[in-house]
Image (cartoon, rainbow, N blue to C red):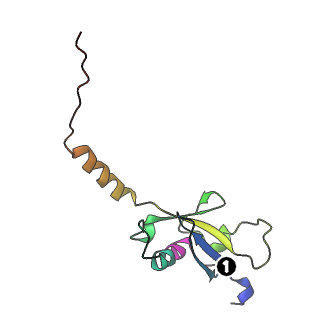
């Protein structure tokens, strides 16, 4: 594939730091990008994805679907040729993990505070 066909992407993390830029084929899927993000995630971050499904990629205000390709996600913003496209990478644990955490909170013993007024 000619190098001029490659799309250059970087991924902005929650603290403003970046992963990349890296060059991708327009045929690369969002799922492939997420795998790369997990592999390249800085080890010193407090919040880190455990799997690709924990990462949400946002481009132009839209959450990208795993089966979409880079070519389909590239937005024509009038960017300079060979410009780097920035996507936001957000860590969001899968729903199964979130539901397990919610259940633990619900099952925890609750200590009530009685607000009574005596007159």
Q: Nearer the viewer, residue 118 or 26?
A: 118
Element at label 1: strand
Tell me the quarter of the image containing the C terminus. Answer: top left
Q: Is residue 41 left or right of residue 19?
A: left
Where is mark 1, residue-wise?
8
Q: Residues within 10 Å of mark 1 (few under 14, many from 20)?
A: some
Tell me which corner region of the image, top left, top right, bottom left or bottom right, holds residue 24: bottom right
Q: Residue furthest front?
A: 119
Q: Which residues are magenta?
A: 26-34
Q: What residue is rendered at 65% in x and 67% in y? A: 73
- Residue 90 sits above or below residue 83 on the image: above
Q: What residue is rendered at 78% in x and 70% in y? A: 79
Percent coordinates x, y for residue 87 in the rendering: 61, 67
Q: What residue is rendered at 53% in x and 64% in y? A: 15
Reply yes or no: does residue 117 show up in magenta: no
Q: Is residue 26 left or right of residue 90?
A: right
Q: Nearer the viewer, residue 19 or 23?
A: 19
Q: Is residue 81 left or right of residue 59?
A: right
- Residue 16 sits above or below residue 6 on the image: above
Percent coordinates x, y for residue 112 in the rendering: 22, 33
Percent coordinates x, y for residue 38 in the rendering: 46, 75
Percent coordinates x, y for residue 46 in the rendering: 41, 67
Q: What residue is rendered at 69% in x and 75% in y? A: 84
Reply yes or no: does residue 33 show up in magenta: yes
Tell me which corner region of the image, top left, top right, bottom left or bottom right, holds residue 80: bottom right
């Amino acid at each position: 594939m000619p190098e001029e066909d490659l799309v250059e992407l970087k991924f902005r993390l929650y603290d403003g730091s970046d992963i990349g830029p890296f060059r991708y084929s327009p045929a690369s899927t969002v799922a492939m990008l997420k795998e790369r993000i997990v592999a390249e995630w800085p080890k010193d971050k407090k919040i880190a994805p455990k799997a690709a499904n924990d990462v949400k990629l946002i481009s132009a205000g839209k959450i990208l679907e795993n089966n979409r390709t880079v070519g389909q996600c590239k937005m024509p913003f009038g960017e300079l040729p060979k410009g780097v496209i920035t996507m936001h990478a957000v860590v969001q644990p899968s729903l199964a993990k979130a539901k397990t955490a919610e259940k633990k909170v619900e099952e925890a013993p609750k200590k009530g505070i009685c607000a009574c007024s005596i007159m």
